Amino acid sequence: MPSRIIEISWMRGSQEPPWRLLQNPPWENYVALSYCWGGDQPMKTTLSTIQQFSSVLPFSELPKSLRDAVLTTFSLSLRLLWVDSLCIIQDNSVETAKEIASMPQIYQNAHVTISAARSARCQNGFLHEISMPSAQAQVFKLPFSCPDGNFGSVNLLHDPDLWDPIERRAWPLQEFLLSRRILKYGSDQLSCSCLSIELHGDHNAEVDWFSKRDQRLLDLRWRYRYSQYNTNSIIDSWRHLVSEYTRHKLTESKDKLLAILGLATDIGTRRDDKYLGGLWLRDLPVELLWEVTSPLKPRPREYRAPSWSWASVDGIVECFVDADAEVDPDIRVLSYGVKPAESTAPYGGNGALESGYIQTLGRMRRADWIEDRKTLVVIETGDATVGYALARTTYDADYGVSIGPISVWCLQICPYEPTLEKGPDGLILTTEDEKFFRRISTFSYDPDRYEDEDPSFYDIYREHQQKWADGCQLRTIIII
């Protein structure tokens, strides 16, 4: 059971159900609420309100979405409801981090999770009429013969603008993945789902009927649940999870690691692995090979995570090599460390990390990054340079207008594999003192992305790949 929960009691003769907070409740079926805050909460538990909320309070004082959640809980013949803004002391950072780390148990143990999907703010509520189609919606009205012999009509609707507000937010994603059953109040319909079936209104919904967005989320949920029984698939599940998570928005940028902490705690416990600001120690250094696919944004001004973590940037993140990709035999992670902003919190606790580093021994070489930072030019002995335009490079962030070439170091993580004609792959780093390095990009050699080229092109390509591999030297560095 959660350490704190809302007790609902509808007294005889009462026009509305009073509620209060229970501390350390005994085991009983309860409901969890997943909803969009939409800004600071008009009613929340703090050190100054905890005593007041432990007494019987009127239903009318709750924000609309919370009132609707109370009514829904009562209609399900249940009397206990968990809501984060009321069941966690919001101005106690130690408790906040501790309770967020308990999210897996809270949502997994809930009898059902109410998803207030159609509501963008807690004041809006969700027990209201469904949304009307937008002007861009395609609506078709077809005649329909009812079983009782009467004639009616069926409206077929495709609305590209019909998004539930909760589907764009980052925090509810882990609540969706962790919950056993979800009662979703969407903009266009009510649905109920568990791990084996999805119901829309009064009818079963085959998976093929879902939108691409719904299918992607259901596939992610299946992967995550399956990984509980197959530990070999956990890292694959985590990669898909990070890709989906980085598509969602956060009101507070500093919450980048916090809003996924519940899932990280769950995976770390099952995997018995160390969590380093969004990456897993057991899978380093391959875990470092992520890239931002779109859109590129400037790096946040406020420190959030080390440059080698995807949590340090914004935009959709993908891993561009397989989890079981061959790793350069010479690369080693010699030491590592992350310092959480809240020292008592598990896995880096209450949001942004304070600092982090990885010390590596690996094959490196110096290069210049030119032509809008899309081409690596390797510095050779003497005055001559050879351009390696065939290596694919990607930005981690929008660095603004490029002014001439910049000097970089390249750390090889995956080696050149002549039989597969792939590699090397690695990180592009910058340094000001030759001691501490920061990640700014990745590079990759992959001939598969070129088609219908002259055979001599591939000969040159393989020559460049081999030259790169032969020109690297072992070096120990610290990446921050």
Image (cartoon, helix red, strand yellow):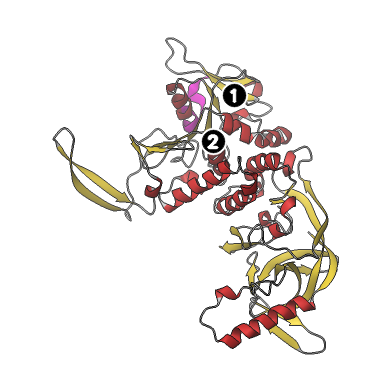
The answer for how far apart the CA atoms under marks 1 and 2 are is 17 Å
User: How many neighbours does mark 1 have within 10 angstroms: few (below 14), some (14-19), or many (20 or more)?
Assistant: many
Q: In this view, does 308 lie above or below 60?
A: below
> In this orientation, does residue 37 appear?
no
Checking the image for residue 5, the label placed there is 1
Q: Which amino acid does label 1 sit on?
A: Ile
Q: In x, y percent, where is residue 409?
A: 77, 72
Q: In the rendering, which numbered label is found on residue 24?
A: none
- Neighbour class for label 2 at 10 Å: few (<14), some, many (≥20)? many
> Badge 2 is on which residue?
179
- The residue that appears at 74% across and 68% down in the rendered structure is 412
Name the residue located 38 percent from the left edge and 54 percent from the top edge: 160
Q: What element carries label 1?
A: strand
> Which label's residue is closer to the chain start, 1 or 2?
1
- Which quarter of the rendered picture does the C terminus lie within? bottom right
In this rendering, is residue 84 above or below 351? Answer: above
